[in-house]
Image: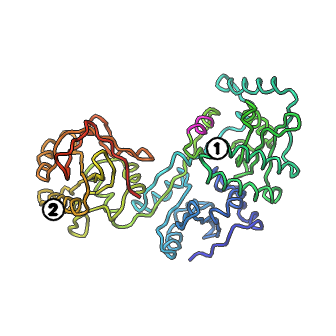
Amino acid sequence: MIEFQPVRLEDRATIERFTMSSDITNCDLSFSNMYCWQEVYHSAWAVVDGFLVIRFQIDGGERLGYMQPVGEGDCARIIPALREDAHAHGQRLRIVGLTDQGRDMIRNMHIGQFAFESDRALEDYVYAADDLRNLPGRRYQPKRNHINRFTAEYPDYRYEELTPDRFQACMELEREWRQVHEGHTSELCAEQRAMQRGFAHFAELGMTGGCIYVGDRMVAFTYGSAVNDHTFDTHVEKADTEYDGAFTIINCLFARHLPERFTLINREEDLGIEGLRRAKLSYHPVVIQHKYLAIHLHPDELECKRLWTTCFGDEEQFVDSFLIRYYSRRRMLCIERDGGMAAMLHLLPFESELGRTTYIYGVATAPEHRGEGLATELMREAMRLIEERGDDAALLIPSPGEEWLRDFYGRFGFEGRTPVEFVTKDGFDFGTGNAADDLAMFWQRRPEQQRPERLRCLWNGK
């Protein structure tokens, strides 16, 4: 096992010796973020063969994640050490926050061993600092108009450096802001605790901030710290929404007060919040920084991926997304031949207008084993399980253009051509890729039950 130690204030110089010289702009590698969110993620660090490694608890739970190792050269060479550390804790290796370059390093050195995916809600928005400072050109005209309206309506406004005597006013404004955004209570309460920790050690963490006053009232504040020598990370920005334009002007003026060495400003992720996404896009980021998750695959997942790619020809990104989000060994039936997976199918849990509905998905047989009756054997076992556990219905979508499959599935009680829609939180496409071809065949426990003209299936798994 690697000897990790908790991220402490006294570790800042050691950690920043790696991060400050790095080109990685990921906001999670800001020392201030590591320290301020310590209560949630329990971040710890170690140096492994010349690379800084950060280990943390994903979402504050039991699963361990490892940040992209930071150092000179190819970080993929220390992956076996991380894998052993994860295994020592009874877990698989999960690497979080990989850049495109980091993903390619690991993919090329550990061919086929990992599945990769970037969650759009967690990708960082990175801007040219001069764009935020100057708001140049026609595309920023709406922002300049917003600022002009604010300065005309509040001519007594002023920008001030964020100093300790103003921290209490910041917390009061944050509480007011949080009341308006109570739909995200858990995240915001955690953010409040991170703010308190940051304010308690503001100078020690190398943080800097600014605020806007109208008269004696603070109407906006922001602060952050460096990710590396040329990238600044904005950790927090809050404003009183009663003062139209407060967000726009604090954003601009704070950027102008940052040292010129910062050529990039990271304004972090949008968490999938639509309004926040629109606001961040309206400032025209120079890059939306991918932060890939890499999961080391178990042997059954590797076999599933191999067979899926061979039989369906789907892109690797699609197969990886399925494996990371929805695959479960307990929901797969398979037959092995010659030491490998020869045939498979997946029994996926949904709820529909028909009740508890199993979707038979990804039915595949390796080309060299077709004609041996393996799909028939799997379908018989699938239907036995479906009936045994009392499901109300089952469905499947035969491959478009393969009419013989309808006869094959008809032997197991499936019939019809009903349009079907799959509903998931992340919008994963469980269909064919073309909604017009998503025509399902159904088996029903009660054949007399009326089938809707279009079926809507809601994911019901964990």
Query: Vertical placement of 323 versus 47: above or below?
Result: above
Quarter occupied by the N terminus: bottom right
Secondary element type, mark 1: loop
Look at label 2 and name its amino acid: Glu
The residue that disc 1 covers is 181
The residue that disc 2 covers is 377
Q: Does 207 sit left or right of 342 as displayed? A: right
Look at label 1 and name its amino acid: His
Which sits in the foreground, 355 or 197? 355
Which sits in the foreground, 116 or 62? 62
**Image coords of residue 356 (percent x, y):** 30, 53
Tell me what residue is drawn at x 67 percent, y 59 percent.
37
Is residue 361 among the parts visible in the rendering? no
Q: Mark 2, residues whose alpha carbon is within 10 Å: few (<14), some, or many (≥20)? A: few
Q: Is residue 277 magenta?
A: yes
Q: Mark 1, residues whose alpha carbon is within 10 Å: few (<14), some, or many (≥20)? A: few
**Magenta region: which residues?**
274-279
Quarter occupied by the C terminus: bottom left
**Image coords of residue 106 (percent x, y):** 49, 59
Q: Does 422 sit left or right of 266 as displayed? A: left
First in sequence: mark 1 or mark 2? 1
